[in-house]
Image (spheres, coloured by chain):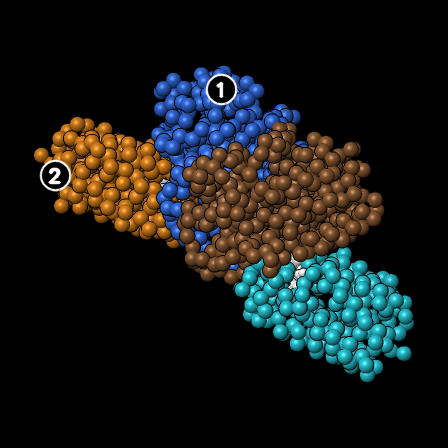
Chain colours: A brown, B blue, C cyan, D orange
Amino acid sequence: MKKLINDPRAVVDESVEGFGLAHADLVTVSADPKYVTRKDAPVAGKVGLVSGGGSGHEPLHAGFVGRGMLDAAVPGAVFTSPTPDQIIPATLAVNSGAGVVHIVKNYTGDVLNFETAAEMAQAEGVEVRTVLVNDDVAVEDSLYTAGRRGVGGTVLVEKIAGAAAERGDDLDAVAAIGDRVNQNVRTMGVALSACTVPHAGSPSFDLEDNEIEIGIGIHGEPGRHKIAMENADGITNRLLEPILSDLGTASGEKVLLFVNGMGGTPLSELYIVYRRAAQILAERGIAVERSLVGNYITSLEMQGCSVSVLRLDDEMTALWDAPVHTPALRWGV
Amino acid sequence: MKKLINDPRAVVDESVEGFGLAHADLVTVSADPKYVTRKDAPVAGKVGLVSGGGSGHEPLHAGFVGRGMLDAAVPGAVFTSPTPDQIIPATLAVNSGAGVVHIVKNYTGDVLNFETAAEMAQAEGVEVRTVLVNDDVAVEDSLYTAGRRGVGGTVLVEKIAGAAAERGDDLDAVAAIGDRVNQNVRTMGVALSACTVPHAGSPSFDLEDNEIEIGIGIHGEPGRHKIAMENADGITNRLLEPILSDLGTASGEKVLLFVNGMGGTPLSELYIVYRRAAQILAERGIAVERSLVGNYITSLEMQGCSVSVLRLDDEMTALWDAPVHTPALRWGV
Amino acid sequence: MGLDVTWAVKWLTLSAQAMAEHRVELIELDRAIGDSDHGENMDRGFQAVLDKLAESPPETPGAALKLTAMALMSKVGGAAGPLYGTAFLRAATTLGDAAYVDAPALAAALAAARDGIVARGKAESGDKTMVDAWTPAADAAAAAAADGDTLAVLIAAAEAAEAGAVATDPLVARKGRASYLGERSAGHRDPGAASSALILRAAAGAAA
Amino acid sequence: MGLDVTWAVKWLTLSAQAMAEHRVELIELDRAIGDSDHGENMDRGFQAVLDKLAESPPETPGAALKLTAMALMSKVGGAAGPLYGTAFLRAATTLGDAAYVDAPALAAALAAARDGIVARGKAESGDKTMVDAWTPAADAAAAAAADGDTLAVLIAAAEAAEAGAVATDPLVARKGRASYLGERSAGHRDPGAASSALILRAAAGAAA
Ligand SMILES: Nc1ncnc2c1ncn2[C@@H]1O[C@H](COP(=O)(O)OP(=O)(O)O)[C@@H](O)[C@H]1O
Ligand SMILES: Nc1ncnc2c1ncn2[C@@H]1O[C@H](COP(=O)(O)OP(=O)(O)O)[C@@H](O)[C@H]1O
Ligand SMILES: [Mg+2]
Ligand SMILES: [Mg+2]
Ligand SMILES: [Mg+2]
Ligand SMILES: [Mg+2]
């Protein structure tokens, strides 16, 4: 394991510290309990948006703290959801009285910790709503599982719900638009190589030289199945098929196409995947109205990508376009 | 070699095609000869800025085409400088009559191809100035080498010279500010792993499990020396020392600190490096006025990073802050 | 009479030792069907328990378990944090502020812990989770409690938990992160069941 | 009399074959002290030469070399593109539109090619570049030209280039990408010198 780290157990502490130093104009870092808030939080009259989860997915979530997106991010240990004693003070810190929305990726740990925190924050007088993100079509049979995981769609939920909060929507409205994004987005990922969790020291799963993992999660947890390596077009076909059939997109619809890198794949390859995904959508008469390509929700240094398709309506498009000013996503300001 | 590609020889074609599809609002792609121009090029009265080089460093250069930065980017084959028959039409396409500045990284191939292209463009009546970027302090003895390489500083030259062109500076002024940035920036890189050029199929150099390459170039060309793996703080010390001694920064000066990922290193690790670099600068009384952290000039999927320090003056700071709207760098608009 | 706070502190201390010793093993179990963090999470959590114990020594077994619940809840994270947190909290509530824990109280505490895990995680027996260690443990404790011997209760619970953990090997996971693997989760031991068995063995060891 | 356009076309065809055959070998040489692209660049460039030759067959040796210069300049890229482009352009200029190339003209063309490379790249002998193949080749050609035998001139040039390429092995690079390696560049053959030797051997092969 070769990593640019010092003590494997200090990775999150030191990384968040560096993040705070680099973006001191935008965010404030609380070291213990660990959470990151928007510099001007709480913003008077505005619904607060809090997300969080295990670390190792940077820039998610702390990179999305700022005007027009999150008010706070709560980083856990690597791939481990944060604890209520972090989530509660973060929630209190961004509550201006208008209530707080928790954006939670659907993993047992995240759900349980945010649930506990929400209860306790409510007990302190903060109204909390939860938007659960579960866009991963790789999880097929949700009856006998913990349900679909929250993956790439999370970034889109955070941007669009963040814009709704910024324009002054109330608590229920912000939660509703977050839910709407979640309901209209589907994601599927692939890993070409595993990542190595610093404290574990060895790759999170095994792949032969000629194998890839289809339907990979963002924690290095294995996916749907292993297949022999294929070319980018073939892999992209495999990712798009379940997304589009599950989303049930019809010709004439408008979508946002998001090709996300898992951390160790060059941007140039993401554009090759984007090219094929755009071709598939064009063949089906689906209009790509907006796009996002890059490393936004990663899995340490894993090689691979995920593709997300979000069915857009005019309101979502307008909220997507609204100004955002965070370390990792910025436009219009 | 596992990559999200189709034909290894079509990597640049397909990647640039995908890039053009994803950013059709900002850029126009010419497929053959291959170059990328700003959508609204040529901009009347404005000096044109053209850069280019081998592919594999994405988002550099095409990702920096747009308002406030480059007017055109010319991508060569992977790690191979582009040819005059690409550079010439790109130069002509962005010339509004105010002349064109070529931003060229100091590699024999880039220099020779841009030199030829500049001559021929001049013959067609376009005034051309060249800004040579050579910020890599890893190359020690420039008397007996091809001189210092152009690396991370290139991004800063392109941003700041781009802002100067956008505000209406004339040809010589734009070239002068580009040179000034180059004279005030120093960079040093490290590789934890090698990258694999698609057409070559095997890693560009060999590193043992416990070895790293200090002073790596951005083409997988070996660096100053191999050393045994160290922790992030130790490595960062090694990168900063030659930068600061060569730059001769004094206490009280203001700088921009740029921690760049080589492509395969997680953002979280870049922030750990940033943290230590910021500590070192603070210890020396140097004020970090601006920062940039992320994958901006990469070496395919190489693991590692480079650190650049740019000595700022008020004009450079203002030009850095000026609006920029490109696929990979955007603010103020 | 019965077990006192010294036992409780020894239990937690032995648990912390067990988590440190088996850290890599638990990481490896989680690596196979999860995300490689369970050993790290539990080790971190029980180190925090030790710190808390040193900081403010508890006066009753119930207080010791409550402090443990709080430390685990705030330091473990992931799925295991809230689940173990709830388990220890429910057990602590059952024990109240009694100075001594007899066999029936022990059995009741273990049943409450199990119920807490089920209430939070909604897993059933056979879902390949820590419930598959806690349910047989609670049942075995209840059966052994009739004889009135606390050590026997704890040994019965530990043995049942260990057997329960082993029995997760062939199961297909239906809850937690391993459930995403579907059929591929069979053939691996559930990490949470394994850590549960270690903790219950520590309880018996502390009473021996 | 002397060599005609058929020879020139055969030379370029054999060169293209050599680049394709030795593509991986040249990549490997460049991998050791450069950036792993020389074989790919040269192969791509000479395939373009073949395309151009098929598209518009040249009528004189000079025209063939000029077309080659243009194709290499526009398709090779990197350092080698402009250097080989200049070399072939200067050689073409020397030959003019003569239908036949005699031994002195050949030697003059090789000298012009070498001078072109030096003018562009500013490398000296011993800098571990393609100059270390071209300079001995041009010198050997000049010496052999006195006898008037074009084949002898080309064989002398090829042998000298091959020896020159081998002689780059122990050198420390002072120009091009390999120079960044400093002392570590010693012990490896310069890829550009190796491709130069292949091209000059093809010239002799075409005349045989
Ligand atoms: N719904 C649930 N009910 C009971 N136990 C569960 C549930 N989900 C997960 N677990 C337990 O948690 C363990 C995983 O804990 P850990 O690895 O620390 O958390 P995470 O899965 O968040 O990484 C599993 O091995 C399983 O025993
Ligand atoms: N200044 C120079 N003068 C002469 N030859 C040079 C010079 N610089 C590089 N070369 C030659 O170019 C070869 C490298 O070509 P190539 O790998 O195609 O280009 P690049 O170095 O741009 O990747 C070297 O092996 C060397 O022979
Ligand atoms: Mg986890
Ligand atoms: Mg090259
Ligand atoms: Mg886990
Ligand atoms: Mg090369």
Image x and y of residue D125, in percent: 33, 41
Looking at the image, residue B27 sits to the left or right of residue C69; the answer is left
Query: Are there few (<14), some (14-19), or many (20+) residues within 10 Å of tag 2?
Result: few
Image x and y of residue A218, in percent: 58, 52
Does residue D144 appear anywhere in the picture? no
Ligand 2 within 8 Å, label 1 CB: no
**Which chain letter matches label 2?**
D
Q: Nearer the viewer, residue A295 or D23?
A: A295
Q: Quadrant of the C terminus of chain C?
A: bottom right
Q: Which residue is mark 1?
A: B43
Image x and y of residue D46, in percent: 27, 40
Looking at the image, residue B224 sits to the left or right of residue C27; the answer is left
Displayed quadrant of residue A221: bottom right
Q: Which mark is residue C182?
A: none
**Which chain letter matches label 1?**
B
Residue at the bottom extreme of this rendering:
C147
Real-space CA distance between mark 1 and mark 2, rounded to the nearest whole angstrom: 60 Å
A140 to A153, vertically: above or below: below
Q: Which residue is mark 2?
A: D148
Give the residue drawn at x 58%, y 42%.
A184
